[in-house]
Image (cartoon, coloured by chain):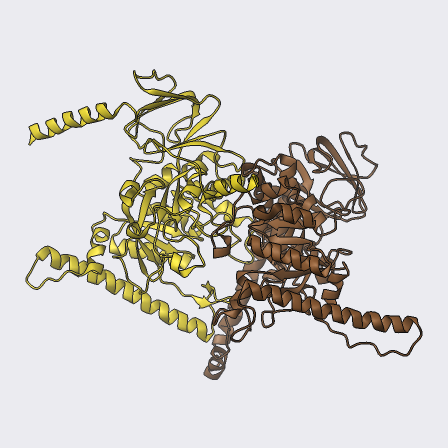
Amino acid sequence: MNRFALFLMALPLMAASQTTVIRNATVLTVTKGTFQGSILIRDGKIVEAGEKVLVPDGARVIDAGGQFVMPGIIDCHSHIAADSINEGAVAVSSMVGIEDVINPDDPDIYRALAGGVTTANILHGSANPIGGKCQVMKMRWGKDAEGLKFEGAMPGIKFALGENVKRSGSPGNGFGASPGLRYPATRMGVEDVIREAFTEARAYQKEWRDYQAKVDRHEQAVPPRRDLKLEPLVEVLEGKRYVHAHCYRADEILMLLHVADDFGFRIRTLQHVLEGYKVAKEIADHGTGASTFSDWWAYKAEAFDAIPYNAAIMVRKGVLVSLNSDSAELMRHLNTEAAKAMKYGGLNETEALSLVTINPAKQLGVENRVGSIEPGKDADLTIYDKHPLSNYAKVEKVFIDGELYFDREKDLEERPGKEARKKALIDKLKAQEKKERKKPEPAEDKKSEEPGGAQ
Amino acid sequence: MKTGAALLAVLLTVVSLRAAGPDSFLLRGATVHPVSGPDISDGSVLVRDGKIVEVGAHIAAPKGVRVIELKGLHIYPGMIDSDTEIGLTEIGAVREMSDISDIGLFKPQLRAATAVNPASEHIPVTRANGITAVVTSPGGGIVAGQSVLMHLNGWTMEDMAVRAPAAMRLEFPNIRVPGRFGGGGETPGRGSAYAEAKKRYEQQLQELNDFMESARRYRQAKMAAGPGFETDLKLEAMIPVLDGKLPILIRAEKEKAIKEAIAFADKQQVHMILERGEEAWKVAAQLKAHNIPVVLPPTLRLPDEEDQPYDKPFSIPGELSKAGVKFAFASFGPGADDNPRNLPYEAAAAVGFGLPQEEALKAVTLYAAQIWGAGDEIGSIEKGKWADLIVTDGDPLETRTQIKQMFIKGAPVDLENKHHRLYEKYLAR
């Protein structure tokens, strides 16, 4: 019932084909400076952004006087809108993927949108050294699962190191359906699992190459049996799938970089990477991005050396850094998380805003589409009433592909109607229950035996 | 007797005058934000023996008093976090490093003050962002134990304690149906899980009432001092609560539980502080009528119901403020997103959604002090209070603001901490 109510408000509030001009705003382009001016949007794309933009006839004009426009926020690590995230029974679960379990009705999508987020990388959990496939999504609330997917984004896969992965090697601490012990139980074992998997993947890749070579020579050939676990790993070896690796400690970070070097692929991003600041040079040399928390620490042993200066140190040492949420709540205020990198380590405004816009866009390989306000890019924009690096700022409007997906004013307007609809439905349910209660006894007994009736 | 008191007074004056040398200083030239009154631009604060002795626009430096020029900066009272685990938990996931929750349902004799580690890394990390005092509470069971209000500076608890104990903490029984991820919920339903949970709740409520009754009888027996009276440490610990000397901090989240907690406090005639109170906004009039203050749940949280407006948690503090309910913000840390150092941002998050900025600031300073019965000692920059002061380059509720200096009980506090040390070490690598 609630979902239906939420769905109604979700339909795009403005058509994409329309020409829209946002004017009188302070425009934080992130890549091309900040100015007082306008943005022209047509067919879902930014056409022009500048101090003086001519308003075409028939264009819809949004006056953003006193307000601030920035690129929609990009969260490089989230688990919203996924029905399940951890296949923990095996140490290598590359055969599963988030793309198959997207729940477009998750209200966290709307909440993220209302926090200025337009794109997110939805990851598998951290139960396995090699986890499941990721899905990059746009927060197109109201669209179905396919409609949420960021078309053309590079596919990804989750890796994980350290405590979460080892835990399943300890009795009684497993994830999900994992019965009893599961290798590995140490960081040494974690490395081994990854090396074993890529050794297998190489052999599998060779089988297919040999087969292809025979086909090319017009020889008779039997195709190898498809292996859904190894296929994504071959894509990693061939640079067709990005690796997003959950990690904490400096030692395991270096271990993974060495493994990747040995097998000839690159880790696209290190996720969490709380001790990244200790080996920032090595991370930069490998050409790996780092996506971290602003200031989480001490919640587990491997997070005890986490520091809020992590992002700033890595930026200074030449690493491409983003700040992520890993939390449906934190996701709603990544703009002020970025402000923490100014407080801790002295990044400037543009560097700070880059951490949640253009940098994660680069890490996900979608920087030609999103992450800054530039002509030709998708019109994914967030309008704030105050400077987005202020804790007092709130999101007023959010556009994705030029469509208005969140409008605070409209949200407020619709609340009484929604409350009334909810009440009507509850009253109806109550009346129905009252009627049912009048029925003879046996029916009542049967009902109470149903497990989980509360849900 | 009278002469003795006079002599003591003279002696104290002499002592304080003698100590006036190195421990006295005048902060000058800053914008002073007393919180209890209007801001003073180009203001001064005179501190002696740890206490604030004068606040104003133009205070002449007494002879021999050190002057600290703070032109262009701001002075605020140190902030107070009303619910943390500081000192009781070092690393959340490591069982050996947590002393929050002991075994049993009724354990009022357990005191947070005795188990706080004054050398915890969380103390310097937290105070570096302007927090000078926190409440640390035990958890688990029904009567969890005694909370402490303490300064974030000192070699021992004796140095740190402001109120030890500050409250008796009670987790009010409620109907908890196991959720999908093992978490609890209070959603009523018709299944057997609900029936079981309801039975457990009713039983716990009965046990709680019985426990209070036992404590009351114990107090009577103790006063009667009859033969055969035996000390019971659990019941003994409840006497200050029954006497109305120690507030009872009651955790209750939903409307039903909050109403029951209010009725309980009323019946038991105990002084109640509501903790968490997600749905306090539904009971605001009643809280106001009973003069019950609230330690708010994190502002930066998801809506409590699937179909709640997306900004409900942000707007609740403003609604409570309008309804005249007194409250303080808390971080419930030291976990991950509930870092106590982020306390000011829990307050700031409510400002865009209806809470006046001055009220947000009071709810991390003066109101917190008042709720914990220490309003005459800390929480504002006023004559006679401890000099718990922070010097900043701006509004402390804003992330970008830097804390430049700190004083706790008039002593300059080192803002260095584990995080900054690691920063300098690895930046130089």
Furthest residue to the right? A218
When the figure is inspected, residue B59 is found, relative to residue A202, above or below; the finding is above
Q: Nearer the viewer, residue B11 or A224?
A: A224
Question: Is B410 left, or right, of A395 in this rendering?
Answer: left
User: Chain B appears in which tint?
Assistant: yellow
Judged left or right of residue B427, residue B89 is left
Q: Based on the displayed image, in which of its 4 quarters is residue A359 positioned?
A: top right
- Chain coloured brown in the rendered structure: A
User: Residue at image x 28%, y 23%?
Assistant: B21
One can see residue B253 in this view: yes
Please tell me in which quadrant of the rendered image residue A35 appears. top right
Where in the figure is residue A50, as x and y percent of width and height?
Answer: 77, 32
Residue A328 seen anywhere in this rendered image of the structure: no
Tally of numbered discs: 0
Query: In the image, B71: left or right of A272?
Result: left
Taking depth in this image into account, of A253 and A382 the one nearest to the observer is A253
The front one of A285 and B286 is A285
Q: In the rendered view, does B413 fall on the left or right side of A450?
A: left
Residue A328 image point, x, y percent: 57, 54
Residue placed at 63% from the left, 43% from the top? A409
Which residue is located at x 53 percent, y 44 percent? A308
The residue sitting at 41% across, 73% down in the picture is B195
Q: Position of residue A373 (x, y in %)?
A: 74, 40
Q: Which quadrant of the rendered structure holds the N terminus of chain A?
A: bottom right
Q: Position of residue B161 (x, y in %)?
A: 29, 43
- As drawn, the residue found furthest toward the bottom would be A442
Figure check: A125 above or below B247 = below
